[in-house]
Image (tube, grey):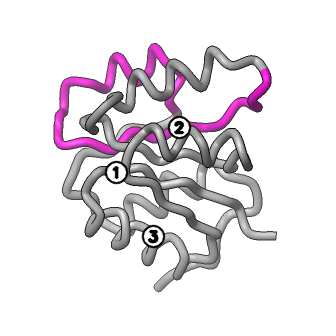
Amino acid sequence: MAARILVVDDDESLCELLRMHLAAAGYEVSTAYDAISAGYQVLKSPPDLLLTDVNMPHMDGFEFVAALKADSTLPNIPVIFLTSVEDGDHRGKELGAVGYLTKPVRADRLLEIVAQHVPGGAIPIG
């Protein structure tokens, strides 16, 4: 069974690009364009990994992950932060993030870090 990944980013084009790369590597991918809709998806069906932007409207990625971590009814979901801001790595680590990718993200780097943190892995590329 393919690992399930939720990609959260307010840039719909980037969300779709990430979804395509991850799906081509064998992952089951869903997307959300803000933390509110992402939170609904997590509550409905927790993913195996969360890939989230930091800067989003309504609630930033750090606040979103902090809210998820505070909900004891949810499983521990590995989180990889995705952002154009390089100085947030320390805050992401405080929240227990397993990775931090700076935009623009190379597909090979994305797939490498995702494969390290989800069960089952993905279909190798190349």
Q: Which residue is mark 3?
A: 19
| Region rendered in magenta | 73-97
Question: Disc 3 marks which amino acid?
Answer: Arg
Q: Which residue is mark 2?
A: 79
User: Which residue is drawn at the image coordinates 17% and 34% (left, top)?
Assistant: 85
In the image, taking residue 3 as reference, residue 24 lies left or right, namely left
Label 2 and label 1: CA atoms lie apart by 13 Å
The secondary structure type at the circle numbered 1 is loop
Q: Amino acid at mark 2?
A: Val
Which residue, given by chain and number where applicable, does mark 1 sit on? 9
Residue 2: x, y in percent?
74, 69
Q: Position of residue 78 (x, y in %)?
A: 61, 37
Check the image and report above or below for 79 versus 33.
above
Contact? badges 2 and 3 (CB < 8 Å): no
Q: CA distance from mark 3 to mark 1?
A: 11 Å
Spatial CA span between label 2 and label 3:
16 Å
Q: Residues within 10 Å of mark 1 (few under 14, many from 20)?
A: many
Q: Nearer the viewer, mark 2 or mark 3?
A: 3
